[in-house]
Image (tube, helix red, strand yellow):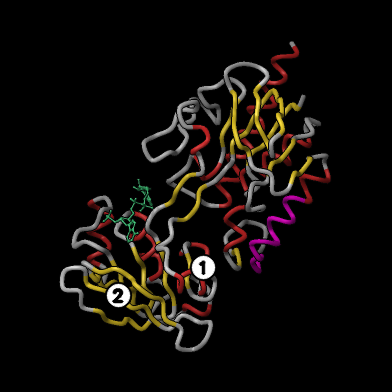
Amino acid sequence: MEKVVIIGSGCAGLTSAIYTARANLEPLVLTGAMPGGLLTTTSIVENFPGFSKGIDGTELMVEMQQQAERFGAKIQFGSTVEAIDFSGQPLKLTVDGKEVETQTVIIASGAGHRHLGLESEAKLEKKGVTYCATCDGALPMFRDQPLVVVGGGDSACEEATYLTRFASKVYLVHRRDELRASKIMAERTLANDKIEPVWHSEVIEVMDVEQDKVTGVKVRNNQTNEESTIDCAGLFIAIGHIPNTQLFKGVIDMDDAGYILPKRGQETNVTGVYVAGDCSDHVYRQAITAAGQGCAAAIDAERYLASLDQ
Ligand code: NAP
């Protein structure tokens, strides 16, 4: 039987792995379909402390993985959990058709960016299409250029406001004429001279006149059906996230949007099951906060296991 199984291999999961491995608990890490998590989809990470020149997202995650392995973490690549039975001890997981028994589980399954679902969006990802202004906004390709943000929630407003530091202008494309964001955030955004709202509009195509580089977006006004093009160097898509928690529905407490609600610290409502990172955090969603929660979840799990030995 395992002592610790970690579901997910982003910043939260791998930090849990480093801490539990160093506590000699030989954690089993199930990487899921995207080893390294969402950070591997960004280019350079400039805000993770300790890297004054920035570090490539994938490189950072490989470093974390090797650090965990060095202390005895067992990384099972590509493995996803198909079913869970948390009705008692041991906790049971079905992984690649086989049952795994464990004393504790750390859920660090992350969240995915909601996509517009356009072919051109997928083609130009990392080439001007991005899902994280904090990660990518300061890149040279976006400096002093017009940029487009899609969405009307707090994330879109926050991203648009953040991007005004770098961009010559930010167009905020929203499908309605009223922002979903909190009142204060919406007011602040609309009062910003550098932000121009584009109401009742939907992005229907990302353009790359210069091959492999965003040069503009085509939008359609959903009231008039009129199409127009906005010239821009980048498209920041901020239309929400989808936590990867479907598997735990009905067993682990979560809010209506599917974010896991910890009971105390990183503990969930099920004894021996802990949570960390984006699958439970829709507020901060940073690599460093996920890592911090991963550390806390590992310490919680370690203390629980120690209490069983007493
Ligand atoms: P959100 O509140 O769900 O907003 C998503 C926005 O994207 C909505 O305006 C929605 O339009 C739009 N949208 C969704 N699907 C779309 C599509 N396919 N095409 C075009 N537009 C689409 O998501 P969020 O902004 O990421 O915020 C998530 C949670 O985190 C919220 O509770 C928010 O308050 C919180 N948050 C807080 C802060 C903060 O306090 N600093 C910062 C960021 C996020 P409609 O409005 O028409 O539905």
Label 2 Cα crowd, 10 Å radius (few <14 / some 14-19 / many 20+) = many
> Considering the image in quadrants, where does the N terminus appear?
top right
Identified at 27% across, 63% down, the residue is 189
Looking at the rendered structure, the kind of residue marked 2 is: Val
Cα separation, mark 2 vs mark 1, equals 23 Å
Q: Earlier in the sequence, mark 2 or mark 1?
A: 1
Q: Position of residue 92 (x, y in %)?
A: 65, 25
Q: Position of residue 208 (x, y in %)?
A: 46, 83
Circle 2 sits on which residue? 219
| Eye-nearest disc, 2 or 1 | 2
Looking at the rendered structure, the kind of residue marked 1 is: Asp
Q: Is mark 2 within 8 Å of ligand 1?
A: no
Instruction: Find numbered disc 2 in the image and state the secondary structure of the residue it sits on.
Output: strand
Q: Kindly identify which numbered label has been placed on residue 113.
A: none
Label 1 Cα crowd, 10 Å radius (few <14 / some 14-19 / many 20+) = many
Identified at 36% across, 73% down, the residue is 148
Q: Position of residue 123 (x, y in %)?
A: 52, 73
Identified at 39% across, 60% down, the residue is 238
Q: Is residue 263 left or right of residue 79?
A: left
Q: Residue furthest left?
A: 224
- Name above or below for residue 255 compared with residue 309: below
The quadrant in which residue 209 appears is bottom left
The quadrant in which residue 63 appears is bottom right
The quadrant in which residue 207 appears is bottom left
Q: Position of residue 198 (x, y in %)?
A: 24, 71
The residue closer to the viewer here, 263 or 82, is 82
Main SS category, magenta section: helix
Q: Which residues are magenta?
A: 52-65
In magenta segment, residue 62: yes
Circle 1 sits on which residue? 136
